[in-house]
Image: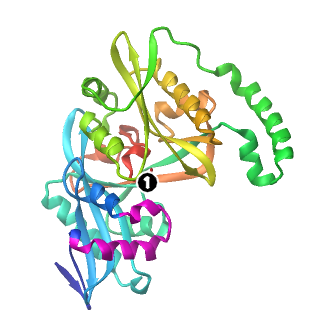
Amino acid sequence: MEKSQHWVVRDGSEKDLQGVLSLRRIAFGEMEEDKLDPRFWRWEFQEGFDGSAWVYIVEDQNRIVGHFADIPRRFSVQGEVILGSLSLDLMVHPDYWRRGIFTAMGRYGAQRVKKENGLLMIAFPIRSETIFGLKKIGWREVVKLPVLVYPIRFRGILNRYLHFPPLSYLVGGIARLIYFLFFGVKRGKRREGVEIEKVLSLDQQFDGFWQKALSLHPIIGVRNRNYLTWRYLQHPTRKYAIYRAMKSGEMRGYIVLRKVELLNFNSAVIVDLLALDEEILPALVERGIQHSQQEGVDLLGFMVPQDHLYYKILRRRGFLPSLKTFLFMVYSPSDKNIFLSPKKWYVNWGDTDVI
């Protein structure tokens, strides 16, 4: 326990649930409204795949005024599985800003993760003050994560700006024609022997696939069958669609999608995407586009480092850069410089709890 003035930093538990949710409503309002559901909190912080979260509470006279948490997360680092954490949900009550609470919670968390033998902490901060605060206590910026978008319904996109459906329909048709003059000829061709199927449960093929896929990226969060089941099929408030690619009876890749609001558009996003080769990846993306068309959305989005192979393949497939960019940061007390190398990591939306 760490004390400063009248407030203290301590470990949290389920007993703090209502106080934490009340603080979240004050700090974030209705943003990610489903996180105000106690079922979400229990799934994420108590029933995590790699164990219960380490929760840090700032309390002032029995009032919760600060919150931070680390979810245990295992990573494959050049084939070796290590323990780390996903740091998230840093909240400070507005009445307690600029009192050192952010710094106290960050340092408290780093000591707790170290005590649990964690070798690194990762985060995807959005707010500039959070990024500044993390850097202040030793976190490092690793790579920016741009959001690529694929236009599904041009008239839906344009109607947001024009607010006149007949004109949106006309201009949208022209925009679609221009777009396909540039990208239409680059549509993925049929790949012999590749079958894309929707799955409602995950079988042992996912574990066999993971054993092959983990060597594709120097550092990647563990994505075996049990983790994917917890992350996408056991989520209490969110629904995901999962497709896998099969060839010659062998699983060769998968894609996970979810319908959300992105960039203030009715959208779908590729939450997770992993394939063994460049033949399978475009086939999965093509199925993701078809799924999005069936859902009637305007955009399909994907977040990935710009230097990653997937970014280049999706750009060739017709995905366009957007103005939205996220940030990936790492804290590690170890001397492994590989953790700070942008080209070693593969991270996407599935590594966060945002989508």
Looking at the image, residue 241 lies above or below residue 141: above
Q: Relative to the observer, which residue lies in front, 153 or 54?
A: 153
Q: Position of residue 74 (x, y in %)?
A: 23, 45
Residue 275 seen anywhere in this rendered image of the structure: no
Q: Is residue 160 left or right of residue 220?
A: right
Disc 1 marks which residue?
354
The image quadrant where one finds the N terminus is bottom left
Question: Mark 1: few, some, or many residues within 10 Å (few <14, many ≥20)?
Answer: few
Q: Relative to the observer, which residue lies in front, 344 or 118?
A: 118
Looking at the image, residue 93 lies above or below residue 149: below
The answer to which quarter of the image holds residue 125 is bottom left
Does the segment drawn in magenta span residue 25? yes
The answer to which quarter of the image holds residue 292 is top right
Q: Position of residue 224 (x, y in %)?
A: 26, 34
Looking at the image, residue 28 lies above or below residue 62: above
Q: Relative to the observer, which residue lies in front, 77 or 89?
A: 89
Q: Position of residue 146 (x, y in %)?
A: 53, 46
Question: What amino acid is found at the position of numbered circle 1 in the picture?
Answer: Val
Q: Is residue 337 left or right of residue 124?
A: left
Q: Position of residue 177 (x, y in %)?
A: 79, 29
Residue drawn at x 29%, y 30% is 214
Main SS category, magenta section: helix
Total tally of numbered discs in the picture = 1
Residue drawn at x 55%, y 32% is 291
The magenta segment: 15-37
- SS at circle 1: loop
